[in-house]
Amino acid sequence: MILIKLGGSVITDKTEYRKFNKETVSRLADEIRRSGEEVIIVHGAGSFGHVVSKQFNLQKGYQDDKQIPAMARVMCVTRDLSSMVVEALLAREIPAVSVPIGSCFVADGGKLILDNEEPLRRLTELGIMPVMFGDVITDRQTRFSIVSGDQIMEHLCRMYNPSKVIFVSDIDGLYDKNPKTDRNAKMIGTVTKKKMDEIAMESNVDDVTGGVRNKMESMLRMTDSQRRCYLINGNAPNRLYSLLKGETVTCTVAKGGLE
């Protein structure tokens, strides 16, 4: 089984509220289907969740009751987005269902805790792909927290022990500088803990769940002596398909863990 994270930067336009990249998601769904590989998908909230979350400081947890309608709005639009992703998968005859993380997880001081994995296990045993996504979730300490798709990926990695983990973004890999703003940025082919410590990366688009560097740290936590994590460009046609089939593609490979 292969674990895939479809980043919000690929499935939405993160500079425009609630803009879904339908053609891109449909193509990625087709690449997954053609590969014939068993996968589980997590996706980011992109512009559907981040705009309102930032406006009402939801990333800081509960501050006042004015945030509650905003929390409900974010939970509504992230479900809309997930339904669109699932529709694209179903259109390619991939049995998938959206699973809000609040049905299986709870947070404690911002830390995600898997409260009940049975629903996920039973879905996958039936051959149905659970599609999970970054969302607002209730929190034992701060009343609610924003949970990123990357945090979900780490839990699913421990649950399912995938053969590989793939992060699908809107850039070719990890760079030493922001490639969208610096022409001299150089792509880093392989990331280890030592290399990661040398990297200073800033995102050119606000992201309440953390920047690119945090995402690569998360990827490293999901590696071991056998498993590798990949960061690829989902806007490049057939790149995801080729990687799923075991071919060499332009990407960043994370390996060796964070120890």
Image (cartoon, rainbow, N blue to C red):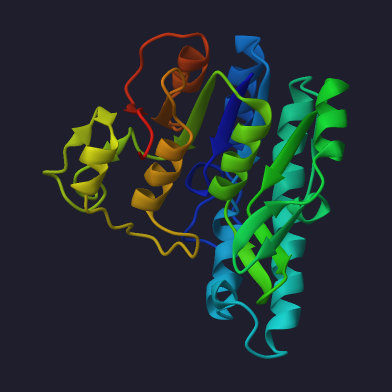
Q: Position of residue 69 (x, y in %)?
A: 75, 80
Residue shown at the point (70%, 89%) measured from the top left: 66
Q: Is residue 169 visible?
A: no
Residue 159 lies, with reference to residue 199, above or below; the image says above
Q: Position of residue 33 (x, y in %)?
A: 67, 16
Residue shown at the point (56%, 43%) measured from the top left: 11
Work out which quarter of the rendered image holds the N terminus and state it: top right
Residue shown at the point (22%, 33%) measured from the top left: 188
Residue 120 lies, with reference to residue 107, above or below; the image says above
Q: How many marks?
A: 0
Q: Position of residue 230 (x, y in %)?
A: 42, 28
Q: Nearer the viewer, residue 179 or 244?
A: 244
> In terms of image quadrants, where is residue 94?
top right
Classify residue 212 as left or right of residue 58.
Answer: left
Residue shown at the point (34%, 50%) measured from the top left: 213
Q: Residue furthest front?
A: 259
Q: Nearer the viewer, residue 65 or 51?
A: 65
Q: Residue furthest left?
A: 184
Q: Is residue 191 visible?
A: yes
Work out which quarter of the rendered image holds the C terminus and state it: top left
Q: Position of residue 108 (x, y in %)?
A: 66, 65
